[in-house]
Image (tube, grey):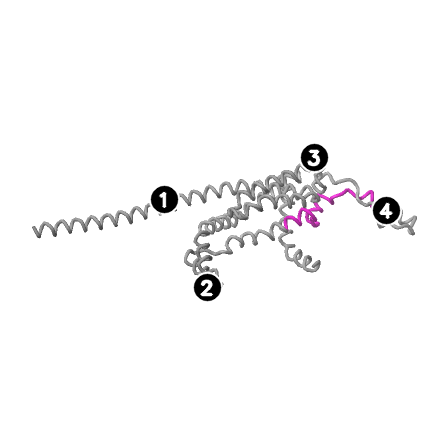
Amino acid sequence: MSQITEQLMQLLKPIQSVLEYVVVFLYKNVTTNYGLVIILLTIIVRMILTPLTITQTRSMVKMQKLQPQLKEIQKKYKDDKQKLQQETMEFYRKNNVNPLAGCLPLLFQMPVFYALFQALRTPSEIITSVLGNFYVNGIANGIKTGLMGFLPALNYTEFLVNGASNPNYNFLWMNLNARDPYYILVILMVVTMFISTRMTTTDPNQSKIMYIMPLVFGFMSFQFPSGILVYWVTSNVWSIGQQWVVNKIVSKQRVKEELEQEKEKLAKKDEIGKEKLKKIIKKKKKRKKRK
């Protein structure tokens, strides 16, 4: 399992390096506040991935609209799995729908988010060469080295080599490489994740996810460094704002489609009405001729 993890990390290393170079650029040219750098980096990444998110949302909305018809097909062919599969695929083809279209954008986003997570949790020399290590440990390492020279027989494996936290990683009331001492970011993460999940969940059957997922991630995040939670909260806030805008766009398109459908129905009714009127006129003409 560890070998697979190492291989995965090696594959994502180029993405992590690109993100770290962006961090260094922002730190040198925009702001020397590491917390603001994380917020700006998160916004940049989310802006780049916005087209994929919009595609995902549109696909989910389209699939939701087709659910009643899909359920009818499932009821009709529930005893014949092969026929059910054929009819379902044919239904997707006729309606120009790809059932995987909602998942693919998410799969494309995952490597980027994981690489960003790694860049914040264990940054490489690209970042540490500019901001320094997480801890100012030169004095502690010096003491250890000195003691080892005079008393080499002692066991130094449990020697505390970490000094004070590096102030370059400070943001507001916390050091971003340590846990939030007041758990404010944990609470914000749970709340914003709940709102975001509620806005993106379109299937009523998945409503339990709205309550379970934020709590699970909230429990996990107790041990995370504050820097990762700053990224997470920023990403959730972006998701809420973005989903609000996307929902507005999708609802406008839906209203437009419904109006077009109504126009088509009215046009058909007019055609039927005109045909009936023509028939009535013809009948009257025939009656007049007979008279």
Of pointers 3 and 2, the one earlier in the residue sequence:
2
Magenta stretch bounds: 115-144
Q: Look at label 4 and name its amino acid.
A: Lys
**Closer to us: mark 3 or mark 2?**
2
Which residue occupies 77% across, 42% down?
136
Number of other residues with Cα within 10 Å of mark 4, as a class: few under 14, some 14 to 19, many 20 or more:
some
Looking at the rendered structure, the secondary structure element under dot 4 is helix
In this rendering, the count of numbered labels is 4
Question: Is disc 3 in contact with disc 2, using a CB cutoff of under 8 Å?
Answer: no
The location of residue 128, given as percent across then percent down, is: 71, 46
Asked where in the image residue 26 lies, by quadrant, the reply is top right
Using the rendered image of the protein, determine whether residue 52 is visible from the camera's viewpoint. Answer: yes
The location of residue 231, given as percent across then percent down, is: 63, 43
Number of other residues with Cα within 10 Å of mark 2, as a class: few under 14, some 14 to 19, many 20 or more:
some
Task: Decide which of 122, 197 is in the foreground and name it.
Answer: 197
- The residue that mark 3 highlights is 173
Q: Label 4, label 1: how many angstroms apart (C-alpha)?
A: 77 Å
Asked where in the image residue 207 lies, by quadrant, the reply is top right
- Taking the image as shown, residue 122 lies to the left or right of residue 199, namely right
Q: Look at label 1 and name its amino acid.
A: Leu
Q: Look at label 3 and name its amino acid.
A: Trp
Question: Is disc 1 in contact with disc 3, using a CB cutoff of under 8 Å?
Answer: no
- The residue that mark 2 highlights is 83
Of pointers 1 and 2, the one earlier in the residue sequence:
2
Q: Label 1, label 2: how many angstroms apart (C-alpha)?
A: 35 Å
- The residue that mark 1 highlights is 259
- The residue that mark 4 highlights is 144
**Closer to us: mark 4 or mark 3?**
3
Of pointers 1 and 3, the one earlier in the residue sequence:
3
